[in-house]
Image (tube, rainbow, N blue to C red):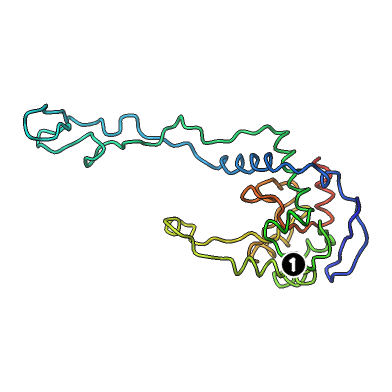
């Protein structure tokens, strides 16, 4: 299957043949497993000290004293029990808890192929909430000159030319303050995802694009399901460069 390649000014440069991965079967179950596997890989196993709360001389005084039969120190203060100061936790985290979602390498690659194919389906992209009215085509492929852009305003002009600015505004207007305790733990804002830019290799466009609301930039070799299907939902609006298409063809 061939798609059109667009210059930075929005004019058509020519056609490019898409890799077969863009016609892969849509498998939302595999995509979900691959994304969860990537997310859980960041977790660090944790557990309590095996002797937490046990390092005390406290012992129970028995019944018949008109006091609760909790373990007490010589001074009469409760100890050891979860409700006492310095006591052990009632249900502490355990190191034997399974935190990771394991997935086979071939399954992971198939999930990525499925997510890439979903990003070329207008129905799935629209269902994810992206604004694609006026976007020339999906998948959207741009001239390799895009990778040489060094300023954010230049990238923004290209996005406006390709009618991607509506989705940028959606992401910018969707930034909200998170509800709950997460505000105090370094994640104050909820930020919607917008355009994903896939480039061939590390380039100036990575730093030029990432300051736009909701925009992420990744190289074709580093692309995984967590980037193109964030939140386990496939169909992210994606902008490919010519070099990225060639690199992706080499991965499958």
| Residue 47 in picture, x, y percent from top left | 41, 35
Left or right: 237 in relation to 231: right
Q: Quadrant of residue 64?
A: top left
Does residue 153 sit above or below 233 in this rendering? below
- Residue extending farthest right: 14
Q: Secondary structure at mark 1?
A: loop
Left or right: 84 in relation to 13: left
Does residue 169 sit above or below 110 in this rendering? below
Q: Quadrant of residue 37?
A: top right
| Residue 196 in picture, x, y percent from top left | 71, 57
Which residue is found at the position 56% from the left and 41% from the top? 40
Instruction: Return the residue at label 1.
Output: 164
Q: Quadrant of residue 159?
A: bottom right
**Who is closer to the viewer here, 46 or 226?**
226
Left or right: 224 in relation to 185: right
- Residue extending farthest top: 62
Which quarter of the figure is the C terminus placed in?
Answer: top right
**Who is closer to the viewer here, 207 or 131?**
131
| Residue 161 in picture, x, y percent from top left | 79, 71
Count up the numbered dots: 1
Which residue is found at the position 24% from the left and 40% from the top? 83
Which residue is found at the position 58% from the left and 61% from the top? 191
Q: Residues within 10 Å of mark 1 (few under 14, many from 20)?
A: many
- Residue extending farthest left: 65
| Residue 210 in picture, x, y percent from top left | 66, 62
Which residue is found at the position 64% from the left and 39% from the top? 33
């Amino acid at each position: 299957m061939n798609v059109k390649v667009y210059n930075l000014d929005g004019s058509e440069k020519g056609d490019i043949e898409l890799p077969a991965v863009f016609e892969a079967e849509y498998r939302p179950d595999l995509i979900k497993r691959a994304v969860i596997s990537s997310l859980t890989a960041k977790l660090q196993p944790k557990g309590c000290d095996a002797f937490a709360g046990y390092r005390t001389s406290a012992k129970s005084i028995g019944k018949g004293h008109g006091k609760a039969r909790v373990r007490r120190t010589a001074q009469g203060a409760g100890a050891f029990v979860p409700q006492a100061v310095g006591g052990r936790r009632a249900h502490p985290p355990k190191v034997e808890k399974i935190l990771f979602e394991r997935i086979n390498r071939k399954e992971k690659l198939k999930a990525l192929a499925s997510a890439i194919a979903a990003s070329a389906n207008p129905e799935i992209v629209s269902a994810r909430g992206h604004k694609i009215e006026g976007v020339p085509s999906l998948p959207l492929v741009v001239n390799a000159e895009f990778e040489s852009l060094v300023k954010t305003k230049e990238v923004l002009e290209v996005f406006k030319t390709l009618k991607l600015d509506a989705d940028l505004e959606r992401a910018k207007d969707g930034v909200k303050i998170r509800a709950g305790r997460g505000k105090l733990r370094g994640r104050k804002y909820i930020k919607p995802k917008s355009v994903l830019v896939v480039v061939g290799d590390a380039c100036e466009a990575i730093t030029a694009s990432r300051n736009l609301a909701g925009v992420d930039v990744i190289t074709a070799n580093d692309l995984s399901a967590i980037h193109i299907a964030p939140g386990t939902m496939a169909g992210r609006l994606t902008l490919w460069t010519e070099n990225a298409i060639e690199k992706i063809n080499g991965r499958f």
